[in-house]
Amino acid sequence: MKVKPLADRVLIEPNPAEEKTAGGLFIPDTAKEKPLAGKVIAVGPGTSDVKMEVKVGDQVLYGKYAGTEITIDGKDLLIMKQGDILAII
């Protein structure tokens, strides 16, 4: 993948949605919640005002409506500003 985010943007691969509940029930596709965690795939260089805190390979938490969904090489990814990331896990 040859995608390089600009400025303080981060490219994230969301974790897969849960297939089963804790009780063992299967969740249908229509009821699955959008994942709120993922793995950082690429990181921009930052700006003079913003130092990049995340790095490639970090697992992160982000807001429910954070980022823009894009598809690259058949993968659904999110691109967002570093400020939309809530935490590194």
Image: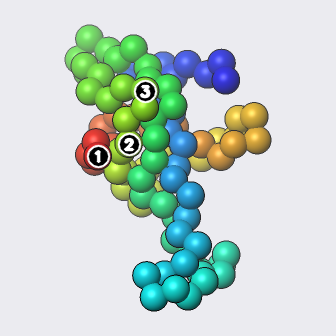
Q: Residues within 10 Å of mark 3 (few under 14, many from 20)?
A: few
Question: Please, what secondary structure does the residue beneath circle 2 have?
Answer: strand
Q: Is residue 83 left or right of residue 2?
A: left
Q: Residues within 10 Å of mark 1 (few under 14, many from 20)?
A: few
For label 1, the residue is 89
> 60 or 78: which is nearer to us?
60
Q: Are marks 1 and 2 in contact (CB under 8 Å)?
A: yes
Answer with the quarter of the image where residue 28 lies. bottom right
Question: Please, what secondary structure does the residue beneath circle 1 have?
Answer: loop
Q: Position of residue 36 (x, y in %)?
A: 42, 58
> 36 or 5: which is nearer to us?
36
Q: Which residue: 38% across, 42% down?
A: 59
CA–CA distance in space, label 1 to label 2: 5 Å
Specify which label sits upstream in the sequence, 1 or 3: 3
Q: Which residue: 55% across, 88% down?
A: 25
CA–CA distance in space, label 2 to label 3: 9 Å
For label 2, the residue is 59
For label 3, the residue is 56
Q: Which residue: 36% across, 26% down?
A: 55
